[in-house]
Amino acid sequence: MNRILRWVAIVVALLLVMAFAIPFLIDVNQFRPRIEGALSQALGREVKLGDLKLSILSGGVTASDLAIADDASYSQTPFIRAKSLTVSAELEPLILSRKLNVTGIEIVSPEIDLVQSNAGVWNFASLGSKSPAQPISNQAPAASGNSVPNLTVKLIKITDGRLSIKMAGEIRPKVLEKLNIEVKDFAPDVSFPVSLAASIQGGGDVKLDGKAGPIDTKDTSETPFDVTLKLNKLDIAKAGFVRPETGFDGVVSIDGNAASSGPELHLKGAIEVAQLKLAKGGKPAAKTVSFDFALDHDLRQRSGTLTRGDVHIGKAKAELTGTYRVENNATVLHVKLVARAMEVEELAAMLPALNIVLPMGSSLQGGTASANVTVDGVTDKLVSDGTLALQKTRLAGFDLGSKMNLVAKLTGIKINPDTAFDNISAGVHSGPEGMKVENISVIAPTIGELSGAGTVSTANVLDFKMNAKLHTGGVLTILSPGGQTAVPFSIQGTSSEPKFVPDIKGIVGGMTVGKLKPLDSDIGKEATGVVNLFRKKKPN
């Protein structure tokens, strides 16, 4: 028994010696031209490897450096640079017949640069092309004249990578860090499983899981795929997904699906946006906005259609549909928003995001809102047109009667801590220069009916010309059916501190003492005094 154990120990020792000795006996660098040739042939780009080392225990060949050339029309610097490349191969044919049968490829800590031209073509579009975008030189041909369709690998891995994505017209690229990609059972002419996970520079992370392929050898960027998409807490401004001049901001999460059948990309799913901001000078919305969507995008035309867009702000709901296109390195929108009977208190949470300011200390309470608005133009110069309406709402903490001051005293408007409205409606035009409001119609039970038009500047400065038919009982009562007094006035100041200025000239010019109640009444005497006070004296 001791003799058997001794021989077993000797055999094991010899095997271990061979395992450690073989890498020194075989100069694996002799395979470097062949490996470079096979990879270059497969990718259609020149591939350069550093010093090669053979590991019997792991069953692979490791290159100390990797460089894959870019499309020459984009850059002369490498498209991919990596610290190491490990190619796993079947050991028996490698050792006995020096035949390389690849089973796995792992790229460690690569830096990958994706660049899109002004024509919308990506620099990786020619990867895998049988007609390489860049000449391949100083390398041996593949072992058996391999072309793209013959390359199969059981497992391809990219670990701890960095991916830079620069779209046409962008100054600052989007960057994915800690990038990990895994492709199983890869063959260019079939569909294969693929997964991706990465963190996004600026905030957020992304995960993809699904299938891709077959590889489109004419344009790799149009290779079909079908994956689930999970995007978590993406800061769209810090990560560079929106331009600063648009004023847009927010933290976005997406749970959806992305599928491509060549040049057509189809996206659908659910989006949640926290701290949403939609205008320059706006402040983050107080509530999270949810968005169920379906989007069709044309990769070649760089345009798309939003076929479904259900917007949810708490219980409030609106519909958003439309189209977009990339033109002169900017995104042009044409969308329509339709809202029916949205709860006002839910919608109020969005006002800061739109840079809409209520009077200081006030808030909208109760009632419903409706809107029918179209939005057109470049994202940083959007123009919107449409109608807005509020029904049965109250502006708490704001007494319109007391703000109108002199008119209130003259007409007997009751002072209340809040102002209730049966209806508010208007036509709105908004653009980079500010907002224009027309056809204003306001019905306030305790005051009367208000109408007019005006503007709101980008600094929220007000300039409105209004007319009111007031329910009166005060000193200035015009004898007309219904007992209403027509009062012109203007609204000045700012949205946070509006100033209601009565048009005294217009008030006095539209009345005569003869229209007032009998002068022996108290109201008649006060009214006569007011008229005489504001009426201009005639020159002698």
Image (cartoon, rainbow, N blue to C red):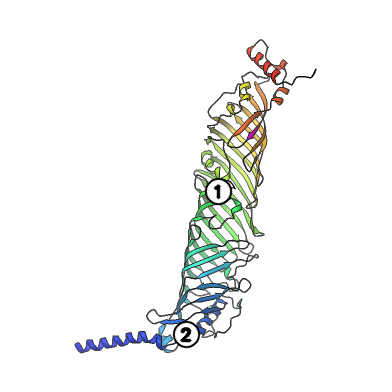
Give residue 209's position: percent from left, percent from top: 47, 64
Residue furthest front as drawn? 540
Residue 286 appears left or right of 494: left
**Which quadrant, please, contains the N terminus?**
bottom left
Q: What element carries label 2?
A: helix
Q: Is residue 300 above or below residue 101?
A: above
Q: Residues within 10 Å of mark 2 (few under 14, many from 20)?
A: some
Identify residue type, mark 1: Lys
Does any portion of residue 313 appear in the rendered image?
A: yes
Give residue 43's position: percent from left, percent from top: 55, 76
List the residue tagged with mark 1: 277
Give residue 483's position: percent from left, percent from top: 65, 20
Identify residue type, mark 2: Asn
Residue 460 appears left or right of 58: right
Magenta region, main secondary structure? strand
* Residue sitting at x 74%, y 21%: 536
Q: What element carries label 1?
A: strand
Residue furthest top as drawn? 520
Residue furthest left as drawn? 1
List the residue tagged with mark 2: 29
Magenta part of the chain: 491-495
Q: Is residue 154 above or below residue 329?
A: below
Say which of 487 and 77 sits in front.
77
**Which quadrant, please, contains the C terminus?**
top right
Give residue 403's position: percent from left, percent from top: 59, 29
